[in-house]
Image (spheres, rainbow, N blue to C red):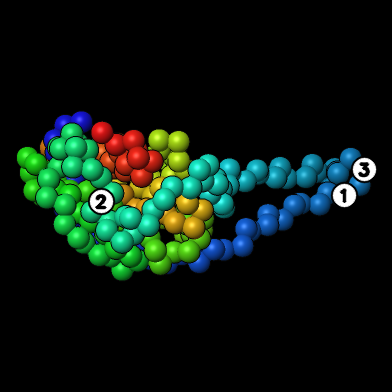
Amino acid sequence: MTRALTSRTSTARAGVAVVAAAAVLGACGGNGGTGAQPGGQSPAPVSSPGPAKPTAAPPVPSPLKADGIVAQPCTALSSAQTQQIGMVDPQSNPTSTGPGCVWRSASDDLNKVTIAPMTANKGGLDDIYANKGAYFEPKTVNGYPAVLSGAVEDRSEGNCNLWIGVTDQLAVAVQAQIARGANKANPCPVAEKVGAAMIDNLKGGAQ
């Protein structure tokens, strides 16, 4: 990836989500026979609803041991991974929903990535699915269920929020904030690359 990593400083907008009950769509009942209305008029066509967004996240295929990054989130990436991605200087950066760590670009310290285990959310990725934001795009990152979702659609400004289910009870936020450089116009691949590296590290496969 190119070295420009993240955008303006913005706080991850992720509150503690409440798992909502799935909405039930009412079905239109029709009259018997041909369905013709009095006066020979045909019934008005019923428009079909658009595709509904999923209300539950896919299950985590193989839960990862995440105690280490909950206790010390700056261990989410190895030193070798940090260097390979082009980041430096991980620093603790707690959020309102749990611990966190921020890495800055080696070439531009205005660009950064934050990794934050969402310990305040006990429903894992299901809580994110229940609290869909201005954008919502399910993903798979390195074999694990994930979703791109943010309260504000500001990806074109260099901000991207990625949530990854590492267990069915714990989601980890990976937030890219890219202020300058080629990745500003499309920051989500940065978040996905960092998220994939984190999973490799949690699996014990980081180089």
143 on left or right of 172: right
The structure residue drawn at horizontal position 48% and vertical position 64%, both measured from the top left corner, is 122
Where residue 85 sits, quadrant-wise, is: top left
Other residues around mark 1 within 10 Å, as few (<14) / some (14–19) / many (≥20): few
The residue that disc 1 covers is: 31
Cα–Cα span, label 1 and label 3: 7 Å
**What numbered label is drawn on residue 81?**
none
Q: Secondary structure at mark 2?
A: helix
Residue placed furthest toward the front: 204
**Circle nearer the N terminus (1, 2):** 1
Other residues around mark 3 within 10 Å, as few (<14) / some (14–19) / many (≥20): few
The structure residue drawn at horizontal position 26% and vertical position 33%, both measured from the top left corner, is 207
The amino acid beneath tag 1 is Asn
Q: In this rendered view, identify the residue nearer to me: 57 or 153.
A: 57
The residue that disc 2 covers is: 75
Cα–Cα span, label 3 and label 2: 68 Å
Q: Label 3 near label 1: C-beta < 8 Å?
A: yes
The residue that disc 3 covers is: 33
* Disc 1 versus disc 2: nearer the observer: 2
The amino acid beneath tag 2 is Thr
197 on left or right of 50: left
The structure residue drawn at horizontal position 18% and vertical position 42%, both measured from the top left corner, is 79
